[in-house]
Image (cartoon, helix red, strand yellow):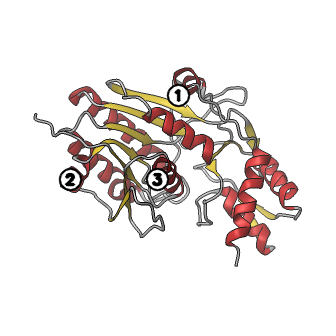
Amino acid sequence: MGTTALSDSILILGAGGFVGTHLVRTLAERGEQVIAVSRQPIDLALANVDIIIGEPNEPEHFLPLLRRSRAVIHTASRSTPGSSAGHAMAELQHNLRPTLALLQALQTHPQSNLLYLSSGGSLYATAPEELATESSPVRPRSYHGASKITAEHFIGAWCSQYGGGATILRPSNIYGPGQYERTGFGIVPTGLGKISRGETLPVWGDGSAIRDYLYIEDFVALCIATLATPMSDGARVLNAGSGAGVSLNELFNVMEAVTGRVLQRSYDTGRAVDAPRVVMDASLARQHYGWNATTLLHEGIANTWAWFNTILP
């Protein structure tokens, strides 16, 4: 199948989201030409960023964008583990369909490297003493997680059939400045919002669930590193996490220490979609890219709170 000469742009899907916005800004500031695709208008007035408003979900929607691109970063997602509960068809329509349309379009552009943001927290289920590695068993407890691992397999199949190169990142819980409050998306902005308004935070379970929290700038640094050199043929899966397990209650204590305020909480029955513990080993990312998460949780929460205060009414 014939191919088309590519330009030097980097195509970012989900450019209006938390991670996408950081990637657009960082890449543009590094002098990259960026094609930023977002469902809604985004406030990024940068000369080397071409903003396209829309939600491509057919192969022909992607083809003109791929002709201009040397790499694709797929950050777009319409769900979380909690929001996907009971909505299997929504995963098919809003997450899998656009991804499969992209892969079909990429069949004629296999030299476009693909960076796909999967998930760590919604895929792994580890024992208390274990760190999840890329070879750990994958047991999605939610439709969101199931669609992520499905997308990973389709990406692997595209690589095998068409000689494509892909890096699949499985990030832990990403947080930081720029992450707005949104129901079901991100415990850090939700908690800080409740603190700022003196409201009570509803907590699923008893607060003992352990997660790995990764600061946005650390994650973006890994994304940039994966794009720095052409990807080899095939799909490589890499964990992206801090390697430190923190319970929800410990996270709340850090928020209180940073803000100097009390976070009121009400505890309820835990959810089936939530694993009791997910902490990830990112040794492969360190091995391949010399990458480490360097931002301590207290520092990251302090930076996030400082930004949060700039947007408070």
What amino acid is at disc 1?
A: Pro
Alpha carbon separation for disc pair 1 and 2: 38 Å
Of badges 1 and 2, the one in the foreground is 2
Secondary-structure class at tag 1: loop
Q: Which residue is mark 1?
A: 137
In percent of width and height, residue 16 lies at 46, 61
Q: Which residue is mark 2?
A: 64
In percent of width and height, residue 116 lies at 41, 41
Quarter of the image where one finds residue 71 = top left
In percent of width and height, residue 309 lies at 74, 68
| Residue 276: mark in rendering | none
Q: Nearer the viewer, residue 78 or 14?
A: 14
Q: Which residue is mark 3?
A: 24
Alpha carbon separation for disc pair 3 and 1: 33 Å
What amino acid is at disc 3?
A: Val
> Residue at image x 52%, y 27%?
134
